[in-house]
Image (cartoon, grey):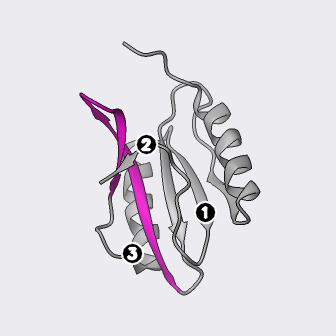
Amino acid sequence: MQPRLKAELWIKAHIRRVELAGATAMVARRGDDMSGSVLLKLNRLDGTAQVLAPAPHADAGRVWLTATGADPVEDRAAEDFIRRQVDFDPDLWVLEIEDRQGRHFLDDAVE
C-alpha cells in the first residue's frame, strides 16, 4: 500500500500549482488535517461548475471522477452535491479552483 499524503499538505501544494499556472484556488471548506478526503470544485466563473472526487484505482493508484457529470452544471447544483457529501463525511475538504477553462491541474487520471 502506498503511503498517503496528509490532506492539508496536498491542498497547499495544489493551490501553489494552480496559482503558478495563473488561476485561483482557495480552501472552500477545511476538513480533517490528517485523514480528510478532498473534493475539487472547478468554478468556470460563468455560473457553472464541476466537482471532482477521488477514487482508488487498481492500476493508477488514484483517479478523479467527475462527480457531477461529464458536463458542467449550475453552480447551485455543484454546491448541493458538495453539501450532501459533507453531511455524509464531515472530515471532507473542498478546494475551489476558479478557471474559465475548467482546468483541474491534476496529474492523476480524470474519468
Count up the numbered dots. Answer: 3
- For the residues bearing labels 3 and 1, Cβ distance under 8 angstroms: no
Q: From what the image shows, is residue 2 above or below residue 36? A: above
| Mark 2 / mark 1, whichever is N-terminal | 1
Identify the residue position indicated by label 1 in the image. Answer: 97
Identify the residue position indicated by label 2 in the image. Answer: 108
Identify the residue position indicated by label 3 in the image. Answer: 77
Q: Which residues are magenta?
A: 47-66
Which of the two discs, 2 and 1, sits closer to the camera? 2
- For the residues bearing labels 3 and 2, Cβ distance under 8 angstroms: no
**Magenta span main SS:** strand
Asked whether 57 falls inside the magenta stretch, the response is yes
Looking at the picture, how far across and down is residue 54, in whole percent?
A: 38, 43
Residue at horizontal 70 percent and vertical 41 percent from the top? 12
Quadrant assignment, res 72: bottom left
Asked whether 62 falls inside the magenta stretch, the response is yes
Residue type at the position of mark 1:
Ile
Which of the two discs, 3 and 2, sits closer to the camera? 2
Query: Does residue 38 appear left or right of residue 111 in this picture?
Result: right
Looking at the picture, how far across and down is residue 75, in whole percent?
A: 48, 78
Element assignment for label 2: loop
Residue at horizontal 43 percent and vertical 42 percent from the top? 108
Residue at horizontal 64 percent and vertical 42 percent from the top? 11
Query: Does residue 104 appear left or right of residue 98 in this picture?
Result: left
| Mark 3 / mark 2, whichever is N-terminal | 3
Looking at the picture, how far across and down is residue 109, in whole percent?
A: 37, 46
| Mark 3 / mark 1, whichever is N-terminal | 3
Residue with the most extreme left position: 58
Element assignment for label 3: helix
